[in-house]
Image (tube, rainbow, N blue to C red):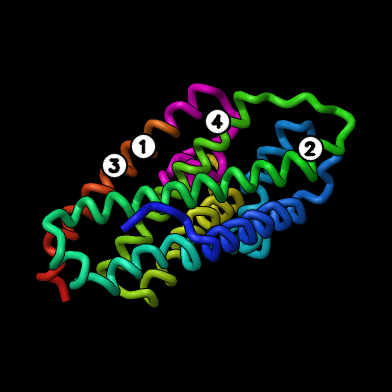
Amino acid sequence: MNTKINKQFLGRIFLLAVMNVLFSGYLFSDLNSFKNDRIIHFLFGSISVECSSNIILVMFKVIPIILFLSWVVNKYISELKDNFLYIFLRTNNRELCLKKNMVKIFISIFLYEIFVMLIMLIFFIAPRESKEISVINLVVLLIINTLQLFMLAMISNMLVLFKSEVVCNLGNIILTTAPLVIVGALYEERKQWIIFAKWFPLNLGNYVYLNSMKENIISILLMIVINFVLYYATAYRLKKYELLE
């Protein structure tokens, strides 16, 4: 089992990156009123607290992510699941197979975010008169987005590996949509509670952008810890896979 990304999956990744930028551009069509760093913030897939109270805008935000999880990430684990007997009866190290799949998934997510960044810079930032841009903020956004999507991928993979694709697809919708909708509801009814919802782990990549470097570092460290916990939880369950229904 290698970690190379085939052309079919590469095409899907690029198509979904284009969709992400176009949808984000539609959400914030009046981009000329923003500075470059703020445009990058939006086009990378962020959403404002105010927009979270509009379910249509929330769907524009989450559709590319849901499709990425279903069309790319989950397919890798589905292949592992479909070839379970062949793979695990011929190797003594199930965790090695899982690691290779996780590496492939991480590479796919990183490529997706790189494509988003390049499309954004070429078609939205380069044509603008002001070329000023913070490289540090760009790198921070790239790291946060990659870690957040990888965190979603880890949870989604546990669902498809140990449950079913139907349960997984439903889980993908809930995982990506519910945190945003909750923030939107709090914005309308209990604004003083928004800060707690914004720091919910699945929301870290949605709102905690460019607030302060301290918050960004905390977000990155927290997501790294969560990803390690999810990985080892998956590895443990995988060792007991034959006992599962």
Q: Which residues are magenta?
A: 194-219
Using the image as rendered, state which of residue 22 and residue 14 is in the foreground. Answer: 14
Residue at the location (31% across, 58% down)?
1
**Residue that label 1 marks:** 224
First-in-chain label (3 vs 4): 4
Q: Which mark is residue 228?
A: 3
Q: Residues within 10 Å of mark 4 (few under 14, many from 20)?
A: some
Q: What is the C-alpha distance between the residues marked 1 and 4?
A: 14 Å
Circle 2 — which element? helix
| Cβ atoms under marks 1 and 3 closer than 8 Å | yes
**Residue that label 4 marks:** 140
Using the image as rendered, state which of residue 125 and residue 99 is in the foreground. Answer: 99
First-in-chain label (2 vs 1): 2
Q: Is residue 49 visible?
A: no
Q: Quadrant of the C terminus?
A: bottom left
Q: Which mark is residue 125?
A: 2
* Type of secondary structure dominating the magenta stretch: helix
Find out whether residue 207 is within the magenta segment.
yes
Q: What is the C-alpha distance between the residues marked 1 and 3?
A: 6 Å
| Cβ atoms under marks 2 and 3 closer than 8 Å | no
Name the residue at the right extreme. 129
In the displayed structure, does residue 177 sit left or right of residue 167? right
Identity, as a three-letter code, of the amino acid under mark 1: Ile
Identity, as a three-letter code, of the amino acid under mark 3: Phe
Q: What is the C-alpha distance between the residues marked 2 and 1?
A: 30 Å
Identity, as a three-letter code, of the amino acid under mark 2: Ile
Residue at the location (32% across, 42% down)?
226
First-in-chain label (1 vs 4): 4
Where is residue 117 shown, x and y percent of the image?
Answer: 65, 42
Above-or-below relation of 242 to 185:
below
First-in-chain label (2 vs 3): 2
